[in-house]
Every structure is written in C-alpha cells, then in structure tokens.
Amino acid sequence: MAAEKLRDLSQPIDVPLLDATVAAFYGTGSKLERSAADSILRDLQENPDMWLQVMHILQNTQNLNTKFFALQVLEGVIKYRWNALPAEQRDGMKNFISDIIVQLSSNEASFRAERLYVSKLNIILVQILKHEWPARWRSFIPDLVSAAKTSETICENCMAILKLLSEEVFDFSRGEMTQQKIKELKQSLNSEFQLIHELCLYVLSASQRAELIRATLSTLHAFLSWIPLGYIFESPLLETLLKFFPVPAYRNLTLQCLSEVASLQFGDYYDVQYVKMYGIFIGQLQSILPPTTNIPEAYAHGSTEEQDFIQNLALFFTSFYKVHIRILESTQENISALLLGLEYLISISYVDDTEVFKVCLDYWNSLVSELFEPHRSLDNPAASANLMGLQVAGMLPGMVDGHGSPLLQRRQLYSGSMSKLRMLMICRMAKPEEVLIVEDENGNIVRETMKDNDVLVQYKIMRETLIYLSHLDHEDTEKQMLRKLSKQLSGEDWTWNNLNTLCWAIGSISGSMIEEQENRFLVMVIRDLLNLCEITKGKDNKAVIASNIMYVVGQYPRFLRAHWKFLKTVVNKLFEFMHETHPGVQDMACDTFLKIVQKCKRKFVITQVGENEPFVSELLSGLPITIADLEPHQIHSFYESVAHMVQAESDSQKRDEYIQRLMGLPNQKWMEIIGQAHQNVEFLKDQDVIRTVLNILQTNTSVASSLGTFFLPQITLIFLDMLNVYRMYSELISKSISEGGPYASKTSYVKLLRSVKRETLKLIETFLDKAEDQPQIGKQFVPPMMDPVLGDYARNVPDARESEVLSLFATIVNKYKATMIEDVPRIFEAVFQCTLEMITKNFEDHPEHRLKFFSLLRAIATHCFPALICLSSQQLKLVMDSIMWAFRHTERNIAETGLNLLLEMLKKFQGSEFCNQFYRTYFLTTENEIFAVLTDTFHKPGFKLHVLVLQHLFCLVETGLLTEPLWDVTTTSYSYSNNAAFVREYTIKLLSASFPNMTTAEVTQFVNGLFKSTTDLSTFKTHIRDFLIQSKEFSAQDNKDLYAEEAAAQRERERQRMLSIPGLIAPSELQDEMVDS
C-alpha cells in the first residue's frame, strides 16, 4: 500500500497521500482499507517527530479531517511535552497558530466557512496559553484586544478565545493544573481585565452586528463570575445589559448575564445597585410576560427559545433571591416587587419540565430552611422542646422584643407565598421508594420494574422542604391536605395522580407534628382512605388506593403503636391485600407488613384489652389461609415478619411454642422428605423435591434472620440431616460436571442443586452471625461442618466449589475470633491453594470467590494473626502475592478488600518479632505495586487507601523502626546512612524512570515533600494529588475519587444536622428500639 511511505518522516510528508489515507479511514471503503489506514494514522500519532510536520500539513491540505488529525497530534505535544521543546520551536508554533487564526477570521466568508476549524484552532491556542502566559507571552491580552479592533469578525473570534480562556482557568482547572499555576493565571486575568472590559463595552455600544453582540454577551457571561466588582457596578455595564433585556434576539443571553451578576456574593457594598437592577428588571418583565400569564401552559406550547427564556427566568430569580432576598424586604415598594417575583417563581414551578422544576425546588428548599432554621439557634430549651410542632408564635412569647420579633415578622411576610408553596409541594410530590405500583405510559397500573434514581433524589428534597413548611405552619399544612383528600372522596378532584401525590406528601411529613396533632390528623386520613377503598369500583382504582393506604400507614409507626384498634385493622387490611393478585399489591403488602412489625412487634405478643389471646397466636392459627395466594419469595418475607413478633416474646416457653407453630408447615414437609429419603435415597434427586427442599431452607433462613439466638431449637432439629443432604447434592454436582464436561454446570438441574447448597451455607451463616456471642453455639456447630463443608470444598472440581463456603468461614472467624486459631491451618489446607489456582489465572473468572477469599484472609489476619506467622515462607509469599493480585484488580470492591487486608498485614507484622524479616522481603515490592496502581487512572477509587499504605511505609522508615537495612548488602557496594536515605533514592529512581516527562528536580521535590509530611495525612494526600496532576496521568478526567474522603465527612455532618430536626429523618427509618411497651 502506497500509504506505507507516510511512516518515513525524514522528509516533508506527502499531503495528498495523507488526505487519501484519512479519507480511507473515515470513508466507505472496505473494512481492510479502513483498518490499514487506522494502523498508519495511529503510528503517525504516536511518532514523537510527527508534530514537526503539522505546519506543513495545515498549509497544504484543504481536507477538514486531515486538519483535525494534524491538530490532534499537536494537542498531544502541547499537553505532555510542550515545556521540554526548545524555545524557538515553541515560538514558531505559537506564531503560526495565531497567524492562521487571524487570517481565517479576518474576512466574513472564510470565517463562516471554516467555523469548525477556527474553533479547534482556538482550543489549541488556549492550550498553548496555559503554558506560555503570562510568563513567556506577556503581551497576549493587549495583542488580542488590538487585533479585535481591526475587524468585526476578528473581534467575534477574539471573544470566543477569551471565553475559552476564562472557562479553562476558572471552571475546568481542578485536576488539570497545579494549585500554583491556577492562582497565577487567575491573577493575570484579573490584572489585565481593564482592556477586555473596555472592548466589551465598546462592542455593545457601537456594533450593529447581531453575531458579534451575541458572542460578546456570551463571553461576558463567562467572565461575570470572577471579574473585579467595580467593572460591573461602577461602569455602564449593568445599564447596558438591562437595555438589551427587552430585545427578543438577545433576551436569553442577557438574562444569563444578569443571573450571573445576581448570584455574586460579597458584602452589602452594592445593595443600592442590586435593588435598582431588580426594580427595573421586574418592570420590564411585566411587559414581556404579564403576571396573569398561565406560564405552564405557555411553556408547553412555546418555541425552544421561549422555553429557554422561562428556564433562564427561573435561574435569575433563584440566583438573586439566594443571595440578595433580604435587601428587598426593606420598603413596601420593594416588598411588593419581591412578592410579585415569588408569584412568578411559583407559577414557573408548575411547568412540566424536570430541569426547570429542579432549579425552582432547589431554591424553595433553601428558602424554607432559612425561614425555619433560626429558631434552632435560639438557645431556649422550651423552644427546642416544643419544636415538635407547636406554632412558633405560640411558642416564643417572651422573645418578641428580643430575637423573635424580626424572625416572626419575616415569616409573616412570606406566609402567603409559603401557603401557595405547600400546595405546589403537595401537587407535585415525587414517588417514594417504598411505592411499587406505578402508571405506565399506556395509562395502565403496573408493578414498577426499575427504580428511577432521579425521582428518589427529588423525593428527598421535596420531603425535606415539606417538613420545613409543615413546621412553619402545621394548621395550614393539615388544612390543605385534608381539603384535598375530601375532594378525592367527593370525586370532584379524583385522579390516580392527585391521590398519589397527596398520599406521598402525607406520608412524607411523618414525625414533624406533635403526637396529639398527628393522631387527630391520621385518624381522619386513614378513615377517609379506607372509605375511599370501599366506595371505589374498578381493579386498577383499588390497586392505586391500596398502595396509598399501605404507604401512609408504613410511615407512621408511632401512631400505630399508640392505637391498637387501628394497628389491628391495618394489619388485617394488609392480609386482605395479600390475596389481591393485581401486580405489585401483594409485594407491597408484604413489605409494609414487615416494616410495621419491626416497629411495633411488642404489640403483637401481649394480650390487648378486649382480646382473648395475643395477636401472634391468632395469626399463627390462620397462617395457612393468609399465605395461600402468596408467591414463595413473599411467603419468606411473611415468615420473617412473624418471626420478628415471636422474637419480642420474653417468656421462653411461649416463644418456643410459637416457633414450633410457625415452623409447623415447613417442618412437616421436611420430615416427610427425610423419611422418604431414608427408604430410598433416589427420592431426593427429583427436581420437584429439590425445589421443595430449597423453599424450606429459604423459609428457615428468613426466620433465622429475625430470631437470632432463639432460632437454636429449630436449627438443631434439621442441622445434621441438612448436612447430609448437602453432602449428597455436592457429590451429585461433582459427578455431573466431571461426566458432562464444563457445560454441565450450566444445566438447570445442576443450578438447582447448587442453590440448595448455597442456601444451606447461607442459613448456617445467618444463624451464626445473628446468634449472640455464645461460644457453646460455635463449639456445637463448627466441628460437624469441617468435613461436609470444608472437606467437600477441597474435594470438588473448581466449577462446583461454592464461594459461600469462604464467606461462611469468614463470618465464623469474625464471630469466634481467637478461639478459631487452632482451626486456621485446617481452613487453609482446604481452601487456600485450590482457591488461589482458580483466581490467579486471570482477572475475570470466579469473581465471587475472589472477593470472599480476601474477606476470609482479612478475618484471619485480624483475629488469628498468630496462625499466619506459622505459615511457611512459600505460603506467606502466596498470601502476599494474592494480596497484590487483589489490589491490582479493576473491580473496585476486590481492590478495596485487598488494600484493607494489606494495611492489616503491614500493621500486624510491624508489631511482631518478624518485623525486619517481613519488611526486608516485602517493603520494596509493596511500594512498587502501590505506586503502579496509584498512578493508574483505572484505580482512582482506591486513592485513599493507596495514600494510607504509602504513609505507613514512609513513616516506618522515617521513624527508624526497621533496624536492619532494606537494601541488599551483598550486591550494593554503596552503603546508605539509614533506610530512609535508601528509600528516598529508590523512590526517586523509580518515579523518574516511570515519568520521563518530569525532570529529576520535580521528582526529587515530590519525594522530599512526602518524607516531610509523613505525620500529617492531609498534607501528604494533597501532595500526592498535585503530583498526579503534574505528572499528567490524571488530567482532563473526572477526578472526584481523589476527593472522596472529604465528601464523606460532609455527608456525616449533614446527617447530624438532619437528626436535630423532627421528621427530617423519617420515623420509619430511625434505628430506634421504638418504645413499644
């Protein structure tokens, strides 16, 4: 192929031939031609001398794709090698790019025709600027501004370059440049802004060209967030913007600029200008969009431009109010302009568009929390005691002349708007997670198949907003909800959506009222909903009402605990719904039953007034009828719920009797099967029998998860038979796989047998995990499992080994800790070698075994470390190799388990007598491997743990805990003064070799910095982050994983804040042992 000669870069490249190759790559030629072209272009791109041909290519080709290819090559050089190039090459390239840009943008025709090419050149220029400016290209801004004044098209392009520069420095710089460089560029932009500002004002006042004015407004928009404030408020800029606002062609761009100004945050120095700006703006807005307009309607039928306008309007109001709402609360005139703006915003909030609603909702949430929060800071014990729900006015009588008065006046001012806002929240409430019954796009009521995370996030914010609104005025909240509910009953407002949003809103404010008020409110709500269920006809309608009743009652455990009659009615209603075959209803009934029982379990085991026996006893008598129509998974959930009730019974004799009655059906079936098997073991091989065995075991697991230690009599009953079945099924599986080859493991028969094995392991693990620490339980259950479970694991073919064996023994070691030390060799012998062989062939096979194997190792390292010390050096090497293998994994949880295990081992060995020996063998390997994953972008999520391991290693050598040299004394002629000096030099060599694009001085500075900051984790971490960015390994990507720890701390602070406000964390989610007597 002729194109092969392109690879020779010793003479100027053949441009027509390159054009043809690029055309072949993008073209419609054969697959073969395309892949040949791809290989040549890829080689050219990777050739370090290719960039020297870029000028020649750009000057001689007319093909846009070829130009882009050349610019891509150039971009790589600018990003990774620019500073290493000689000065004359840098200057030549800089001038060449600037010249093409000026030449193309100096006349209208070429500027429009080459729009894409010019945009790409602008990006290249800004990439160069990030290296050259300000130090090596001082005159850049003055040059640009003077060029802009020579022609309107050049001016338009200069605006585009300035906008790009601003975005690069202020918006996209985190993770792209070091902190120092960002600071330097920001200062340069600030100090030279005068020229840019004059240019923008000059264009806006003098130009008649629509494109130029739009480009200038767009650039201004990028600048307004950071320029010195005097340029905005002490110049004609604001007036100019407000002049452009009524002009339809510039309305959206101007509105974006005004929103940017509105969101600026600083002292009160420019308040007068802000009030004036808002006044003029609201005046102009009334003529553009009269207050009487039905905005949701207008939005639905508007053009894209008009829809953008409404979205921008929402952004303007929310930005302005977030920062400056208080300055509008001063005079009557300002207040009426403010309330009018809030009316607009409420009207916009009804627009049927998720993005618009998110913008509004975000602001409503911050406004109501600001109106509510102050009375948490009033240090008044009575205030916080009454916070549960009394009206604020009634609760702070002595505070009117102190703190209280301005606060109450402020609430008064907004009370009208807040009332409308309550209605909005009730009408638009998002669907909570617990609701499984939804309307599909064809208008049918179906079971939800996938969770929509956006809706869940929206629900959380709306719920919080509504709780604040409820605290601000409980009366109004209750009145609006009950009024809307009575309209559902009368039929005048009845639709599925109206009832849904109303009930979701009612459920979401649980916990925000004081008890008496909540009781009064709920009695009416539940009574009305039950009535609605009786009087409404139609299966779909009934399903919607059922789902709403279940959601509401599940949210109010405190009410149900206090009202036995209601609790009993509700539970019986749930039993009724368990016979309702409409999709989703039975699932929701079982979920709600479990939720209620967990919070009210004591109520079911005591004999209530007017009853002859506890409810649980009555329930157990009718159990076969109640579960008759349920699917197996629903039956398991039902058993789990009833077991929660049984667990609450304190009299052990009664409790054991309840367990016996509860397990009556499954035990009877189990005894029949075992009895048959004793006569003929073939009976157990029948598929239906295997299914029944599986079902019985799953029921046992559900009950064990609720009963914990109290499950002992039941598991004792079936334990040994269960192990025999386990062994038999295991042999069947191994036989099928060895006879039927690798595909046998995929057959439904083998899968079913394996399910029984897994469920057996899960049942034992659940019981041992939940049982209180009673060593005799361990002694009773662990030894009999050694051969049927561990021995079986070792004997099986790899495809028949259950990973659950590993997690079961990890649970056992975590539970019984050091008492397991003598069993560790036995565990090792059974699982170690054979599992490693399975998981070290590649990174893909047996993912479950990987994770569980490392969890088991970690349990042993934590609780039975002496057993690890007894391993031979070969075995220990296997352990360490497998840990390295784990954290090299790109599967996040495997890598994390490996890193945690590594930290555990490093710390444990540091404290043992084998410290020197261990680190002499593994110190350098560990450091190498950790640096390898730390600088690999696939491993970003492990950043926090990588840092901890490195800190541990550097601390160790810095403190001198290692008393023997880490270097090999026999082969190294040079003797280091101590380990720290050796590790320092070793690390510098390692990193210099890995990052040829960094100078030795930069690497040395980094390594010295690490040694300086070993004792201060946060400095150590920042230092590593900067190095990763500087080494160019982590640029132009999403680097949030490097900041994950800071984000987690922020989440914990937020949770503490939510706990301090009644209702913000739903009562049904609080892990309280609810006072349930």
Image (cartoon, rainbow, N blue to C red):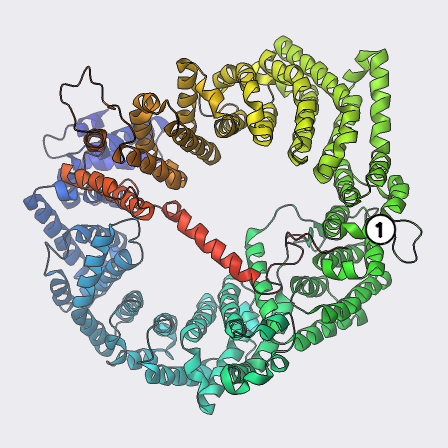
Q: Position of residue 1026 (x, y in %)?
A: 27, 46
Q: Secondary structure at mark 1?
A: loop
Image quadrant assignment for residue 396: bottom right
Image quadrant assignment for residue 948: top left
Quadrant where the C terminus lies? bottom right
Give the residue at x 46% y 21%.
868
- Give the vertical position of 340 relative to 972 (above or below): below
Label 1, residues with CA under 10 Å away: few <14, some 14-19, many ≥20:
some
Report whether residue 883 is seen. Answer: yes
Q: Position of residue 880 (x, y in %)?
A: 40, 23
Residue closer to the observer: 287 or 805: 805
Q: Position of residue 70 (x, y in %)?
A: 21, 41
For disc 1, the marked residue is 606
- Give the vertical position of 413 relative to 64 (above or below): below
Give the residue at x 12% y 50%.
94
Amino acid bearing label 1: Ile
Quadrant where the N terminus lies? top left
Q: Is residue 1045 left or right of residue 39?
A: right
Residue closer to the observer: 300 or 997: 997
